[in-house]
Image (spheres, grey):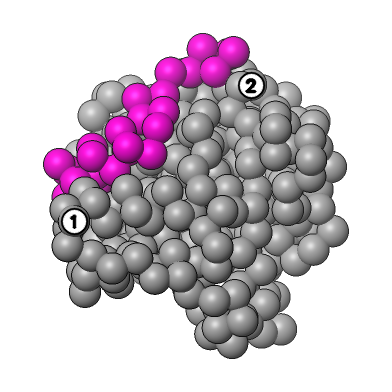
């Protein structure tokens, strides 16, 4: 039985990927700062690491045949300030550097390394990206998230020199009922209000939690290499996403309201740049390499999530 080491395995995406791996017959070990909080099973173990102290359970490394690296502070969990931005950066870069250090030092059997990244790599749409979408060859944008994603990916690049097959998945907005952006969209809809952000025309490059988990499994089981955009092939506008969600959950009993950009800037500060930004990302590369999206449109994704409230 192949052993997969997962960082960030206690988060929304990590739990979904871990569940899928176990269903597929893998044994999983999740690295966490507090393994004592979790109940282990035959196919799911927990091991301690502490990125700030540079510590990791070395047996977890030596037992693994592959690593899925998801660890990182939530970008949208708190309002950005200098301290928060540093924590977002450090949690990604230092955790990657720690894994690299241990894989350089220890005897191991790791042949595959799959890391989360993000479409924050790309800036706002250009005339070209608005038509064709940003491809993986696009250089990173020079802003906080663009520079963070660059440092994030670079932190684990040395693994290529160790002969480890590496894949970095630049993930879009993940749609899940248990965490992330969709919960925020639903808050106002439960009150009968469809809150459209600014004019609502900004493109949202998204992916369903099921397709994202399947993409990590695909990357694990297929000999692909390098960077891939982890987004559905049909980006939505903020307005279309919001109204589709409202109709699905409220029928015709809701009031569409545009939240002005200036108000979002007051509420969210610098983070408002991201919710107001239009970013169209291209999913062609992963499709050409054989991945099939179960939820290629926002309608399919939202209907699926409504029918599966625990996902």
Q: Position of residue 241 (x, y in %)?
A: 40, 50
- Mark 2 and mark 1: Cα distance apart in space: 38 Å
Q: Position of residue 49 (x, y in %)?
A: 49, 62
Q: Earlier in the sequence, mark 2 or mark 1?
A: 1
Q: Quadrant of the N terminus?
A: top left
Tell me which residue sits at (21%, 49%) in the image: 248
Mark 1: give few (<14), some (14-19) or many (20+) Cα within 10 Å. few
Determine which of the numbered discs, if any, sits on residue 285 in the image.
Answer: 2
Residue numbers of the magenta segment: 287-311
Tell me which residue sits at (64%, 21%) in the image: 285
Left or right: 132 in relation to 231: right
Where 249 falls versus 24 (above or below)? Answer: below
Looking at the rendering, which quadrant does residue 170 occupy?
top right
Front residue (pair 171, 83): 171
Secondary structure found at label 1: loop
Determine if the magenta segment contains residue 292: yes
Where 31 falls versus 209 (above or below)? Answer: below
Q: Which residue is mark 1?
A: 252
Left or right: 217 in relation to 247: right
Determine if the magenta segment contains residue 203: no
Q: Position of residue 104 (x, y in %)?
A: 72, 42
Where 289 falls versus 229 (above or below)? Answer: above
Viewer-nearest of discs 2 and 1: 1
């Amino acid at each position: 039985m192949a052993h997969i080491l997962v960082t960030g395995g206690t988060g929304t995406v990590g739990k979904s990927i871990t569940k899928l791996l176990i269903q597929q017959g893998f044994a999983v070990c999740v690295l966490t700062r507090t393994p004592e909080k979790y109940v282990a099973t035959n196919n799911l173990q927990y091991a301690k690491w502490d990125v700030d102290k540079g510590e990791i359970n070395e047996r977890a490394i030596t037992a693994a045949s592959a690593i899925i690296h998801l660890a990182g502070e939530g970008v949208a969990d708190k309002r950005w300030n200098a301290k928060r931005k540093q924590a977002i950066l450090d949690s990604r870069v230092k955790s990657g550097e720690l894994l690299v250090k241990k894989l350089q030092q220890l005897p191991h059997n790791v042949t595959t390394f799959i890391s989360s990244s993000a479409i924050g790599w790309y800036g706002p749409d250009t005339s070209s990206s608005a038509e064709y979408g940003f491809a993986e060859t696009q250089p990173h944008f020079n802003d906080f998230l663009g520079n963070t994603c660059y440092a994030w990916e670079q932190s684990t690049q040395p693994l290529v020199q160790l002969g480890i097959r590496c894949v970095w998945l630049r993930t879009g907005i993940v749609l899940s009922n248990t965490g992330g952006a969709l919960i925020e969209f639903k808050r106002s809809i439960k009150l009968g209000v469809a809150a459209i952000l600014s004019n609502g025309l900004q493109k949202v490059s998204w992916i369903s939690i099921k397709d994202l988990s399947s993409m990590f499994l695909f990357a694990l089981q297929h000999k692909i290499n390098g960077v891939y955009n982890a987004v559905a092939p049909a980006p939505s506008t903020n307005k279309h996403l919001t109204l589709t969600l409202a109709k699905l959950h409220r029928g015709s009993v809701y009031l569409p309201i545009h939240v002005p950009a200036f108000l979002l800037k007051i509420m969210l500060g610098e983070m408002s740049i991201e919710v107001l930004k239009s970013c169209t990302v291209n999913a062609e590369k992963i499709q050409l390499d054989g991945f099939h999206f179960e939820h290629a449109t926002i309608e399919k994704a939202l209907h699926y999530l409504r029918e599966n409230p625990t996902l």
